Amino acid sequence: MTAYEFSPTARFFAKLISFIFHPLFIGVMLMYYLVYLHPTYFLAVSDRGKFFRFMTFVVNNFVFPSLVVLLLRGLGFSNSLQLRTTRERVVPYVASIVFFFWTWYVFRNQPDIPQIVIDMCQGMFFSACISLILNNFFKISMHGVGVGGMLGVLLITLNEGEAYSALPLAIVLLITGFVISSRKIITDHTWFEIIAGFIVGWLMQVIAYWI
């Protein structure tokens, strides 16, 4: 089925889902889940401590990368905020690598940060590095990387014996299906680019967890 066969309504909801679950938003959602919704990982941390750590993540992994994209658009180095070409994605990838590494480095030196958060940040750093390399050959789906990483983190919490993670995992599986389908409806990517992104995001989280 080609892009023009989808109805305007389907394309509208596909774009909406793609926006809501933008890769940078997914990282914030995961951090919010681990800090505020999961019952054990930050159990011994005060509300102020939770807020400080959450905002550290948001500033480094969402605000700064977003500012880089906006700056590139404002200076005319990219034609749109969607970064439709591989060339437009190079600088944002490099910036994300720097910011993701810094977040991981800061968190790994704080004793009250749960290991799963440190591993998640390391996995995001690995994913950005691999995505930059693969970007030289094809336009890997950043949304695919995002939902793959999200699923990887939830599977890791389940592997650690956290029964509470079963329902969130089911929700993430639904989100993954919606996002992957939406990216194909919009036709920004081929199936290969979407699945490759998903595998990279998932695999890098698993590697970060096991090393």
Image (spheres, rainbow, N blue to C red):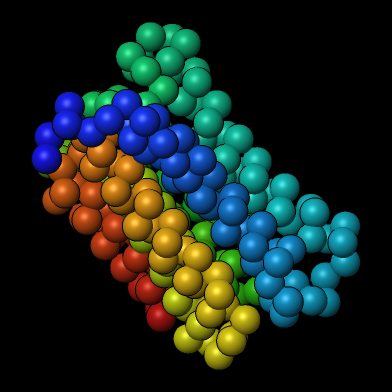
Q: Is residue 7 visible?
A: yes
Q: In which quarter of the image is residue 112?
A: bottom right
Q: In this view, does 57 lie to the left or right of 161?
A: right
Instruction: Identify the image quadrant of residue 163.
Output: bottom right
Q: Quadrant of the C terminus?
A: bottom left
Q: Is residue 98 above or below residue 74?
A: below
The residue positioned 49% from the left and 72% from the top of the image is 169
Q: Residue at x 38, y 58 (%)?
A: 176
x and y percentages locating residue 191 in the rendered image: 16, 49
**Residue in view at x 53 percent, y 79 percent:** 166
**Would residue 133 appear left or right of 168 to someone viewing this image?**
left
- Using the image as rendered, state which of residue 67 and residue 178 is in the foreground: 178
Answer with left or right where residue 180 lies relative to residue 158.
left
State left or right for residue 74 relative to residue 61.
left
Q: Could you tell me if residue 145 is visible in this image?
A: no
Q: Which of 86 and 146 is in front in this view?
A: 146
